[in-house]
Image (spheres, grey):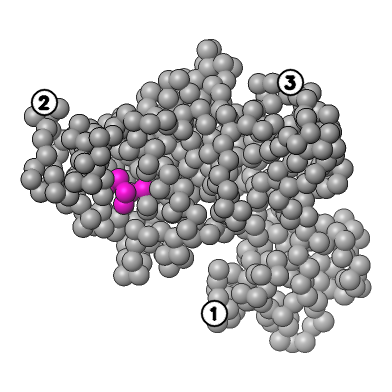
Amino acid sequence: MATKPEVAGSLGASSAATVTLTKKEIERYSRHLIMPEVGMEGQLKLKQAKVLCIGTGGLGAPLGLYLAAAGVGRIGLVDFDRVDDSNLQRQILFSTQDVGRPKIEAAADRLHGLNPEIQIDTFDTHLSSENALEILKDYDIIVDGTDNFPTRYLVNDACVLLKKRNVYGSIFRFEGQATIFGDPEGPCYRCLYPEPPPPGLVPSCAEGGVLGVLPGIVGAIQAAETLKLIIGKGDSLVGRLLLFDALAMRFRELKLRKNPDCPLCGTHPTITKLIDYAEFCGLRGEEAPAAQTSVPEITSRDLKKRLDRGDDLYILDVREPHEYQICNLGGHLIPLGELSKRASELDSSREIVAHCRSGKRSAEAVEFLQRAGFRKVLNLKGGILAWSDEVDPTVPKY
Amino acid sequence: MAVKVMIPTPLRAYAGKQESVEVSAATVGEALKGLTDQHAELKKHLYSEDGKLRSFVNVYVNDEDIRYAQKDQTPVRDGDTVSIVPSIAGGGKN
């Protein structure tokens, strides 16, 4: 994929000695210029700054908008995705009419519309061990707005190897974290978390979701930290992990230390180049046929056939009650987490078909029920999503 | 000593959906034991099979990481807050 930026902007970065603001720029940035903490000096630093935003999703949206509005002279955007209906609840870079467009294209248009004075570089690609160093090397500051562990570790490692600061933000449901990694004086992501959680222990889709405004708040914090690093003012989040709980509406702060034994940025590093991050995060094992898929299954088409011919099947829905309200197949609802306590509600002499949204939780349910002595239990392959695709398209997918 | 143990969102499902629990303990190890005694399911999410705290779970007493104090022997005092802070990766993309 492309590692050379496609330059969508009109103005390239000029040499430091000759950089000035035009009359138009002075008018645009006047609310910065009249503050001594920014002033002409700070605004010229912003104009010469080069910031790379990895991910143009929930975090990348407010981040990109505020960096562009503030006059950061060159902004790189990395994303491979297309805009989807379900993005619009929080990814405020995009409009309804952008659905289906490549995100970086829609984002570049929006940011240019906001500020035509700046240069936007777009990288329509997956960030990988092969292209990361090449893409990151031209930028002063990297901002991590990605959504998965392999890319988080990749961005961290690439930043440490290139000696670049990484403005970090992450979110989960109502909770956010922000800090700055990769500063020579501060820790890196591996100092904080040497290893990612194994795939089986991260919360399933039942606990997923995010309050739309949360990435707005955390992304705006990342933008503020980026601007402060550029102008060199204030106390940065280096060495501090900011925790935000939107439900309690509370900020807390934890001290972060550089770990002298860190394999990447410690005194005797053992990681000196980029590695295979999917393997590091245990995802290779997940892709291989795992124990989870070995439970007996039924496809949604076969289930439909059997129900139509009047077979006595007991449909067990192991999702959460709030998911049942979105759509259901009329099954008996016992959330996976309650199954061990409520298995007695089930009749082991009947044939049970367990389902969830995608088939993952119900596979666990089938495995549990088999161990509990239930002989006739099947997992609905692909869950309610497959049912919607293959049997009844009126069932909404979520 | 009565201390408050803060439970992060991803682990609340295994702790009766509570945001925090009060336990009586003199060290962090005792506080976490008090927590997992109340909520047995949390145990496998916090500890590996050999009984060590998992590497993607960090524990703080107030704002200090116990790895740089006395680990699970770190003393706690009345009114202290023990925070469990796991890594989260979400970026609101999908």
Image vertical order of residue B76 relative to residue B46, above or below = above
Disc 3 designates what residue? B70
Asked if badge 1 and badge 2 are on a common chain, one would say yes
Mark 3 burial class by Cα count in 10 Å: few <14, some 14-19, many 20+: few
- In the rendered structure, does residue A67 fall within the stretch colored magenta? yes
Q: Quadrant of the C terminus of chain A?
A: bottom right
Please indicate whether residue A299 sits to the left or right of residue A151 in the image. Answer: right
Mark 2 burial class by Cα count in 10 Å: few <14, some 14-19, many 20+: few
Please indicate whether residue A29 sits to the left or right of residue A162 in the image. Answer: left
Give the number of the mark in front: 3 or 1. Answer: 3
Q: Characterize the magenta stretch by its predominant secondary structure.
A: helix
Disc 1 designates what residue? A393
- Is A50 in front, or is A315? A50
Q: Where are the magenta residues, as a range?
A: A63-68
Asked if badge 2 and badge 3 are on a common chain, one would say no
Disc 2 designates what residue? A17
The image quadrant of residue A143 is top left
For the residues labelled 3 and 1, say whether their Cβ atoms are less than 8 Å apart.
Answer: no
Mark 2 secondary-structure assignment: helix
The image quadrant of residue B32 is top right
Please indicate whether residue A270 sits to the left or right of residue A180 in the image. Answer: right
